[in-house]
Amino acid sequence: MDTYLIILPYTAVSFSVVARFIFMYLLYTKTSTNIYSLTFCYLSIASSTLWIPYGVVLNDTPIIIRSSVEIFLLSICAAYITRNRCYLKSEAVAAVVTGQ
């Protein structure tokens, strides 16, 4: 019984990290500028930031690992989306100015 209580949280962490990598892959392949994806990133970062102290208080390593990795990966996603929004917007403005 105790083995399941050790394996289950780390399995959940693994699924969560894989899901974030899939999200990152989709953002990359679609060159996302979606404001909803950006909002999702910011809200998830805020949520994970709140989970870290909770995990520390409970001395729950899987929660701390998952939240830390999620903050890191979602920060990369948010930066990528923001970069795309700025870069593609400047390209659109340049096209309008040059008449292309």
Image: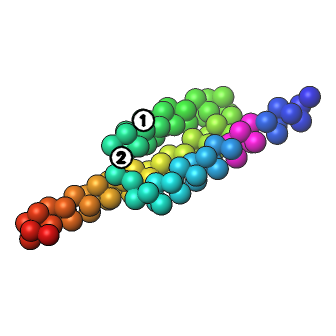
- Residue 54 as seen in the image, left or right of residue 5: left
The C terminus - image quarter = bottom left
Q: Residue drawn at (74%, 42%), measured in percent from left and top?
A: 10
- In the displayed structure, 18 sits above or below 100; it is above
**At numbered mark 2, what does the secondary structure look like: helix, strand or loop?**
loop
Give x and y (percent) for residue 57: 61, 29
Give x and y (percent) for residue 31: 40, 59
- In the displayed structure, 41 sits above or below 97; it is above
State which quadrant residue 53 falls in: top right
Foreground residue among 57 and 90: 90
Q: Which residues are magenta?
A: 9-14
Q: Which mark is residue 34?
A: 2
Can see residue 9?
yes
Which residue is at the far right? 1
Which residue matches tag 1? 43
Q: Amino acid at mark 2?
A: Asn
Foreground residue among 9 and 25: 25
Foreground residue among 60 and 84: 84
Q: Which mark is residue 64?
A: none
Q: Earlier in the sequence, mark 1 or mark 2?
A: 2
- Residue 24 as seen in the image, left or right of residue 41: right
**At numbered mark 1, what does the secondary structure look like: helix, strand or loop?**
helix
The N terminus - image quarter = top right
Can see residue 94?
no
Badge 2: residue crowd in 10 Å (few <14, some 14–19, many ≥20): some
From the image, give the main secondary structure of the stretch colored magenta: helix
- In the displayed structure, 5 sits above or below 45; it is above
Q: Residue drawn at (28%, 55%), measured in percent from left and top?
A: 85
State which quadrant residue 32 falls in: bottom left
